[in-house]
Image (cartoon, rainbow, N blue to C red):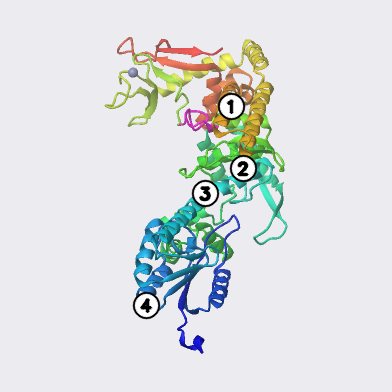
Amino acid sequence: MWGMTAPRIRCVIYVRISDDRAGAGLGVKRQEADCRELATRLNWDVVDVYIDNDLSAYSGKPRPGYRKLLEALQAGRATAVLAWHTDRLHRSPTELEEYISVCDPRGIVTQTVKAGPLDLSTPSGRMVARQLGAVARFESEHKAERIKAKHLELAKDGKSTGGGFRPYGYRRIYDHPDPPHRLLREELIPEEAAIIRECARRVLAGEGLLSVCKDLNRRGVPTSSMGIWTARQVASAAEVGAGDLGEEIRARLAAGEPASAIARDLKDRGVPLPVPGGWSTPTLARMLTSARIAGLREHRPRSRHQTTRVRTGEIMGVGEWPAIITPAESARLRVMLSDPGRRTSPGPTGKYLLTGLIYCDLCKHRMAGRAKSGGLRHYMCDGQPGRPGCGRVSARVEYVDEVIVVAAAGILTTPAFAAALAEVDAGADEGEAVAEITACEQDLADLAADHGAGVISRAEWMAARKPLQARIEAARSSLGRVDVGRVLEGLPTDSAGMEAFLLDGEVEASRRRAVVAVVLERVWVRPVIVRGSKRFDPARLVPAWRF
Ligand SMILES: [Zn+2]
């Protein structure tokens, strides 16, 4: 019979796991089964199966299974290759050219389940293969874009994307405990919501982020990620982790396993964290600027070239979770903490009361607090080489603080100040600014939707965004002025009590500074006029008062 004389083609199967969250990802078992079915149809003999666990397509990481496949072909153990799709076979144009150089001289045939035969023996066949490779690469690069688009869609629907670790203040309720599961709703965790309210109140009252963080850590207040493995914890353990655990993590990462999968596994195994988490200023800033705590949903896009998200995104509307602070408080916090161009904290930091408010009258540069040997503390114009100051003015901290505090306390506790404050408060319409921001952000969201639906072009979208963003910026800057009422809330109303508070070393300097800054715009320090005088001359201080 003719069938007995014809030698059957010996083929090898190559399968690769691909991490495709969009849903097209197929397990190796399924890929192999499809390939074997194709082999049966073609009447080929499967002599070997090569598998790679390469979750990061185009990462350039070595694929041991793929190397073995090429070796088997070079050794002549098979004359055909079966794969599920060409994109499983080679990940880059360089790899395709190598594949061609192995297959072409040996007349090796390639068949795929999804893309049919790959003809590498003719120039036109090779051109098709190269084009297929380019398309696969294009699609992989756009996978990230698709995931982002999915998040944008969820943000518009007011649904949580459910990714990452749970947001502080909220408990996630799923349909069942193990993934893959569906997020049903989010509930408040009262103790954490109370911490968020406390932090918001303190930062709005002018306290520095660092001071709040130190206090939370001192009190042992846990963060949402404390004691829980996250991708970030895995990365840092890989960097600094010692012993078996560090080695295990490094080996698994090197083998291409995603940090998030390692984190899940370590969490399930109950492996304790090597470095306990804690409150840091970025964590706190992220929490307080997140629109989520005001019950609002926002979309924070992250471009492929950025490793971190922008701190504040566009407000997309009202979310499906309960609010912890008001939208007005949120808007103010977002203004205070989010603008990277201006500053990263509500006010200057440091342990000196007048840091950021005190200037040299000779050169007009800022003066800084310094402790000299012997414990004497001075505000100094820094004249070191490379520093902008003239270095010719300095004044004892105790003397300057006392003069300024007595004057500030006097102003803060006069009836005239209270009257002036009431007038300012009436003028600053917080509600109007918040309404303006909300309306403009809604317009931006509508524009984004129009662009997404193809109603307007990208250029039209970008052009229409500009004036809206300018209006938001203007409304935000009117909101951004410090909330005077909050800063003064609960403070003594008599001048002696106010003086004692402002000079109280037990109270964080940033908190006291915020109170002084309500009435003091800045103070210039003149050089010593009468040489040899031991007494501090208050006339050396030239304050500019706001009231
Ligand atoms: Zn100076």
| Real-space CA distance between mark 3 and mark 2, rounded to the nearest whole angstrom | 15 Å
Return the disc, 1 or 2, that comes first in the chain's sequence.
2
Q: Which residue is mark 4?
A: 76
Tell me the magenta residue range: 337-349
Q: What residue is drawn where x is 34% and y is 65%?
A: 101
- Give the crowd class for mark 1: few <14, some 14-19, many >=20 residues within 10 Å: some
Q: Nearer the viewer, residue 540 or 146?
A: 146
Res 458 seen here: yes
What's the mark number on residue 152?
Answer: 2
| Real-space CA distance between mark 2 and mark 4, rounded to the nearest whole angstrom | 51 Å
Q: Amino acid at mark 4?
A: Gly
| Real-space CA distance between mark 1 and mark 3, rounded to the nearest whole angstrom | 26 Å
| Real-space CA distance between mark 1 and mark 2, rounded to the nearest whole angstrom | 19 Å
What's the mark number on residue 464?
Answer: 1
Say which element carries label 4: loop
Return the disc, 2 or 4, that comes first in the chain's sequence.
4
The image position of residue 74, as x and y in percent, is 35, 73
Return the disc, 1 or 3, that comes first in the chain's sequence.
3
